[in-house]
Image (tube, rainbow, N blue to C red):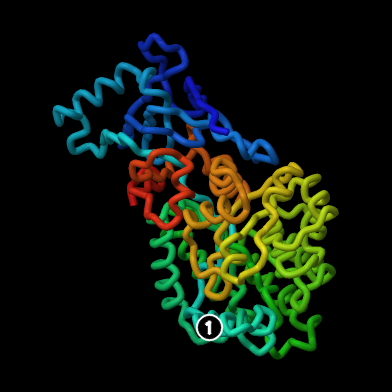
Amino acid sequence: MLTKVGIFFSNPGAKFSPASSASATHFQVSYGMSSRLIYNIRQLVNARMESHLLRGAELNSLPCIDNAWIFIEGDQIADFGPMSELPADLLDRITRSRQNAWGSGTGDTVIDAAGQFVLPAWCDSHTHLVFAGSREEEFVDKIRGLSYAEINARGGGILNSARKLGAASEDSLFNEAWKRLEELRRLGTGAIEIKSGYGLTVEGELKMLRVIKKLKERSSVSIKASFLGAHTYPSEYKDDHAGYIDKIINEMLPVIARERLADYIDVFCEKGFFDAAETETICRAGMSYGLKPKIHANQLNLSGGVQVGVKLGAISVDHLETMDEDTIAVLKNSNTIGTLLPTAAFFLRMPFQPARLLIDAGCAIALASDFNPGSSPSGNMNLVVAMSCIQMKMLPEEAINAATLNGAYAMELGDSLGSLTPGKRANLLFTRPIPSLAYLPYAFGSDLIDKVMIGGEFV
C-alpha cells in the first residue's frame, strides 16, 4: 500500500531556523556544508518522519510523495516535501541554478530528477563478501545432480573456500573484496554486513576479519562484521566437534574481542554442521565478549536455530527455507528479525522461504543477498527484491521495506539508514524514468538504477 505523504515534519536535531515561508511545517536550513537540492522527483519512496522496525501488515505501508523534492546538507537528509510546498528560498535556488548563479564552485548542486523514483539505498544484512576465488566447478556439479550437503561432505563447499582463503594473502583478499564492494555500491547497496567463516583456523578467521575492518575504514558504505568461525567443521575436526568449538571459544574469540574485529557472532545451525546445543554454547561465548548473535537457521532442516536465536535475543535468524507453524509462532512472538535470502534458494534450486506465511503471521522480516561463492554468487539487491516479488509473492512495497528499513534494523542501523528521514544519512538510489514503482521488480532483467548517492556524494 503506497501511503502518500502530504507535508514534511522537520528533524528537531538538525540546525534549522524558522523560515519566512507561509508554511509552518517547513524550515530554512542553516547552510554551512555542501548541499544538494533534488527536485521534480516523480516519486520519493519510503519518506518517513520517523522510523521503526516493521512487522507483518506494516510492511505493506510505504510512505511516498509524488512530484517531490529532497534537500541534502553534507551527508544527511535535511528536508523534503511535495513540489507544491517547496520553500521560497529553495525555489529561488532552482531559478538561480538555471542561470548558473547558485552553487558555482561551492559543491552545491541542483538536480532535476524528472521522471525518476528516489529510494533509500539497499541495506544488505547478510553476505560473505570476503572470499578467495569462485566455485563455478561446483555449480556444474550441482547441475549434474550433487546436493549441497554431498559437495560439502567430499571436501567441497565451505571447505573448498577455506583452502583457497588459506593460500591467499590479506592484501589480495582486500583487493578482491574491494572490487566486489564497489560493484555493489554502484548497484545501490549503501549498507552491508560481511561474515568471516572461510578461514576455519585462528589465522584464517583473523585474516578475514582484519580485511573486513579495513573495508570498514576505507569505504563510504556502512559495514557490520560477523564472526562465523562456526561455519562448518574443518576436516581435522570432523570427528572432534568439541575440540573445534574449544578453539573458537578459547583461541579465536579472545583475539577478536581484543582487536574489536566483529560486531556479531554467527553460527551455521544445521544438520551435519552445528546442532542447536552447540550453537547456543558458541553464541553464549561470543555474547560474553559483547558480540550479539545472528544465526544461520533452518536452511535445510528444522534445525532448532530459530528457537535458539529467539532464546538468546538474536538480532536476526537468517535463511528460513524450512519452517513450520510452531517455528513461525516462536519467531512472531519475539524481537528477532527473520532474514530471507531468496537468491540462495534460487541458486540451490530449493523451495523459497515462506514469506507470505511469515508476513501474515506478523513477523518482522528483512531481505538480503547472501552473497557468497557457493550458494549465492550475486550481491545484486535489485534482483533480490524482484525475486522476492516473483517467487515469494511479496508485494513491491513489502519487498522494498524489507530490503531497506528492516534490512537496516537487522544491522542495528535503523536509526541512521533505511528510510528517507530527516537526520538520517543521505544514501539514495535514483531509478531511470519508469512508469511505476512496481516496474522496478517487474522488469527484473533490466538495469533500472541511474545513479547512487552514498553519504551525500554520488558514486
Residue bearing mark 1:
140
The count of marks equals: 1
Q: Position of residue 182 (x, y in %)?
A: 39, 61
Q: Is residue 92 left or right of residue 303?
A: left
Q: Position of residue 177 (x, y in %)?
A: 45, 69
- The answer, for residue 317, to whether it is visible in the render is yes
Q: Is residue 400 left or right of residue 91?
A: right
Q: Is residue 419 left or right of residue 332?
A: left
Q: Residue at x 74, y 87 (%)?
A: 237
Q: Secondary structure at mark 1?
A: helix
Q: Nearer the viewer, residue 425 or 322?
A: 322
Q: Is residue 346 above or below residue 3?
A: below
The quarter of the picture where the N terminus appears is top right
Q: Is residue 292 above or below residue 79?
A: below
Q: Residue at x 81, y 72 (%)?
A: 275
Q: Residue at x 62, y 63 (%)?
A: 226
Q: Position of residue 285 (x, y in %)?
A: 77, 66
Amino acid type shown at disc 1: Val
- The answer, for residue 288, to whether it is visible in the render is no
Q: Position of residue 245 (x, y in %)?
A: 76, 77
Q: Residue at x 23, y 37 (%)?
A: 106
Q: Is residue 180 left or right of residue 164?
A: left
Q: Residues within 10 Å of mark 1 (few under 14, many from 20)?
A: few
Q: Is residue 389 above or below residue 1?
A: below
Q: Is residue 99 above or below residue 405?
A: above
Q: Nearer the viewer, residue 276 or 172?
A: 276
Quadrant housing residue 253: bottom right
